[in-house]
Image (spheres, rainbow, N blue to C red):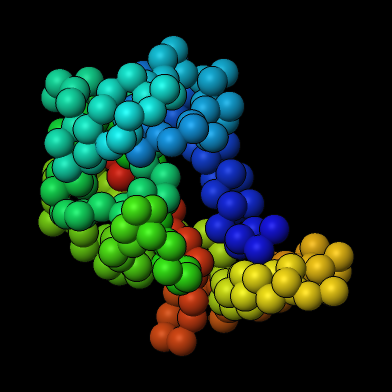
């Protein structure tokens, strides 16, 4: 999978956070913002008493219709709000974060993931890329949060491998070498993951590093 550096860490993180939220909050009401086909629901189903999908376009998986900047739900109506791989497509991220805060109950939390380094991917638009410091500032200026924690989903080697894998897969599938694209991408991912695991300088955010994705846990002040 060319985007392994985003998808694998994201699924692990969401699985951990789904269970941690249940331990902290009990069975919770979850809002999935920009839900699409709700691919992450299986990670939450055993912990949530209700999962509500929101999408900005008509979607049979969503029971709410509207943009993140104007969520059609009452104040403080959800214990956990999930916003996965949506913020980069949002017209007004600051307003969107304020809405995430508004619909989260005091003591509840927002789980947000968005890209750091990624190829241009309009769906239907693609506006933003983030750094950890940028996300901390975005949340800090938009809502009264008790805490905001931002972490990189993967390190520099994995992010570089992802970018190379995307283009390599794109080229190979148009040549007689198409059958080898899967094994080649798999090797790239494994080598990069091992490098990130053993070299601290490739993992921590500092000048010169890359992160394919960021994970945010923002807890609303009780």
Residue 114 in which image quadrant: bottom left
Percent position of residue 28, x then y: 39, 19
Determine if residue 197 is in view. Answer: no
Residue at 20% across / 55% down in the picture? 91
Above/below status of 30 relative to 9: above
Quadrant in the picture for the N terminus: bottom right
Q: Is residue 196 left or right of residue 26?
A: right
* Foreground of the two, 130 or 180: 180
* Foreground of the two, 200 or 112: 112
Determine if residue 89 is in view. Answer: yes
Residue at 58% across / 27% down in the picture? 42
Quadrant in the picture for the C terminus: top left
Residue at 42% across / 69% down in the picture? 120
Residue at 23% across / 40% down in the picture? 68
Percent position of residue 17, x then y: 49, 37
* Foreground of the two, 61 or 148: 61
Above/below status of 212 relative to 108: below
Above/below status of 3 relative to 39: below
């Amino acid at each position: 999978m060319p985007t392994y550096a985003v998808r694998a860490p994201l699924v692990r993180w969401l699985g951990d956070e789904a269970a941690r939220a249940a331990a902290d909050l009990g069975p919770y009401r979850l809002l999935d913002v920009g839900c699409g086909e709700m691919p992450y629901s299986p990670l939450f189903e055993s912990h949530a008493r209700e999962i509500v999908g929101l999408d900005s376009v008509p979607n049979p998986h969503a029971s709410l219709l509207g943009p993140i900047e104007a969520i059609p739900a009452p104040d403080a109506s959800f214990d956990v709000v999930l916003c996965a791989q949506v913020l980069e497509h949002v017209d007004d991220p600051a307003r969107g974060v304020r809405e995430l805060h508004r619909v989260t109950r005091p003591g509840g939390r927002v789980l947000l993931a968005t890209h750091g380094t990624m190829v241009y991917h309009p769906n239907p638009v693609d506006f933003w890329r983030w750094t950890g410091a940028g996300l901390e500032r975005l949340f800090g200026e938009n809502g009264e949060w008790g805490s905001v924690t931002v972490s990189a989903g993967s390190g520099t080697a994995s992010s570089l491998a992802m970018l190379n894998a995307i283009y390599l897969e794109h080229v190979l599938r148009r040549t007689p070498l198409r059958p080898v694209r899967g094994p080649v991408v798999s090797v790239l991912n494994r080598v990069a993951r091992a490098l990130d695991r053993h070299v601290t300088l490739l993992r921590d955010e500092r000048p010169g590093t890359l992160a394919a994705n960021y994970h945010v846990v923002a807890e609303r002040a009780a």
